[in-house]
Amino acid sequence: MPRQTKIVATLGPASSSPEVLEQIIRAGVDVVRLNFSHGKAQDHIDRATLVREVAAKVGKSVAIMADLQGPKIRVGKFEEGKVQLQNGERFILDAAMKELGNIERVSLDYKELPRDVKPGDTLLLNDGLIVLTVEFIKGEQVHTTVKIGGELSNNKGINKAGGGLTAPALTAKDMEDIKTAMSFQCEYLAVSFPKNATDMEMARQLANVAGEPYRHKPGMIAKIERSEAIPVLDQILKASDGIMVARGDLAVEVGNAAVPALQKRMIKMAREMDKVVITATQMMESMIVNPVPTRAEVSDVANAVLDGTDAVMLSAETAAGKYPVETVEAMAAIAEAAERAEDVALDADFTNKRFGRIDQSIAMGALFTAHHLGCKAIMALTESGSTALWMSRHRVHVPIYGLTSQTVSERRMALFRNVTPLPMPTFQDRDQALAAAESLLVERGVLKPGDTYAITCGEPMGYPGGTNMLKVCRVG
């Protein structure tokens, strides 16, 4: 079995050279994340070009995910770069302040904060390491008492416990960044801090308009990091192609203890709704500076795999860490070990389940048949990748191969759990297509004489959504 769980790696100074990028792709990276919170437009365009070149050299389908910055809910800068806040001290967050901050006050990038808070609210700074209690608001100033102190440095983030900040998900910078991302046709666009389905629908509309000259429409990923997103998760999922369990900001808003159960719930809901799901934030954090992960990190990655996540994500570990290649290798090894321990309860997945579409029914039939016959592979001849996506929503220890002539579909399938995307020319004749598919997997060493496999396709050939045939074959 090839590894089922996909690995998303963030590019940065530690991983942007052609040599290191090739190494991490060979080590197991399936999706490259370009973080638009850092760098200029041209930096991202250059990195996207490099990813395409290196992936072609390695001979692997690699998707690009452009991750929008979202609203800057941050403090400003300090005279000396940082201050040390002590418990019980007063500290002012001043939206009108123009000068550099000090031990008494600091400016705000987010000017709406005085209107978003009230006395008694809890503000969490620097990923929750510093806790402030709002005492009163005076004009553009938020007067607080330090509940938990510590070092506060330039541009650290602000969260409000329980959510409630009104900042829009899409900023003017995001709208420009969407145009940049569409210029290199990213396969996925990740939207930061969406609160509802409308945020995702707006982002999709902007991306589709920006992608029109290239005839490109990206898959939309909603980053779930606001507490307001949790009650409307099903609506956000319907408006998206997938979600990211963004555990950092989410934990600050809802509390650390609530996140593991939310992670399981989000992964389960995404799979049930035929959406992809990425689990992110601090998965291998210690490997930024250490060559091996902690036992807790190993368990964290393994549990996300056992929950059924499509992908696990690396952020600073590969962007700025000392051991980007070793981190990817370690994550791949953990995922493979966890997958071997998985239970397959495929029959239970089909109990009382109804399928309203022919192509979806064919996909489910292929899974069921391949599982019970002990097939060596399932092949989906697909234009859009949808058949492979539906198959990948169920746990089955039979590798799925998505064969397509569409480059965009091939790369998008790189994020689907247990799907290996492969390029294959379009055939008008069904029998020629089936023979070519079998030959392709025999050449790759997946199939050998005597092996059985299941294959799905549509007739007539070459139409998205047209899968209507399932065939079980034996290699002669």
Image (cartoon, rainbow, N blue to C red):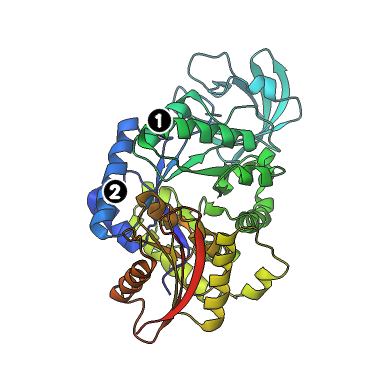
- On screen, residue 286 versus residue 444, left or right, reads right
Q: Position of residue 173 (x, y in %)?
A: 45, 26
Residue under the point 39% across and 57% down: 30
Residue 331, located in which quarter of the rendered image? bottom left
Q: Dot 2 lies on which element?
A: helix
Residue 323 visible from this viewpoint: no
Instruction: State whether residue 137 is above or below residue 469.
Output: above
In the image, 388 versus 460, the foreground residue is 460
What distance separates the C-alpha of mark 2 from that of mark 1? 19 Å
Q: Position of residue 33 (x, y in %)?
A: 41, 46
In the image, 194 versus 112, the foreground residue is 194
In which quadrant will I find the N terminus? bottom left
Residue 299, located in which quarter of the rendered image? bottom right
Q: Dot 1 lies on which element?
A: helix
Q: Which residue is mark 1?
A: 179
* Crowdedness near tag 2: few (<14), some (14–19) or many (≥20) residues, C-alpha within 10 Å: some
Pointer 2 or 1: first along the chain: 2
Instruction: State whether residue 79 is above or below residue 62.
Output: above
Q: Amino acid at mark 2?
A: Arg
Residue under the point 53% across and 64% down: 391
Q: Amino acid at mark 1?
A: Lys
In which quadrant will I find the C terminus? bottom left
Q: Residue 281: which numbered mark, if any?
A: none
Residue under the point 58% across and 67% down: 364
In the image, 231 versus 121, the foreground residue is 231
Q: Which residue is mark 2?
A: 52
Residue 379, located in which quarter of the rendered image? bottom left
* Crowdedness near tag 1: few (<14), some (14–19) or many (≥20) residues, C-alpha within 10 Å: some
Q: Position of residue 456 (x, y in %)?
A: 47, 67
Farthest residue, direction bottom:
450
Residue 171 visible from this viewpoint: yes
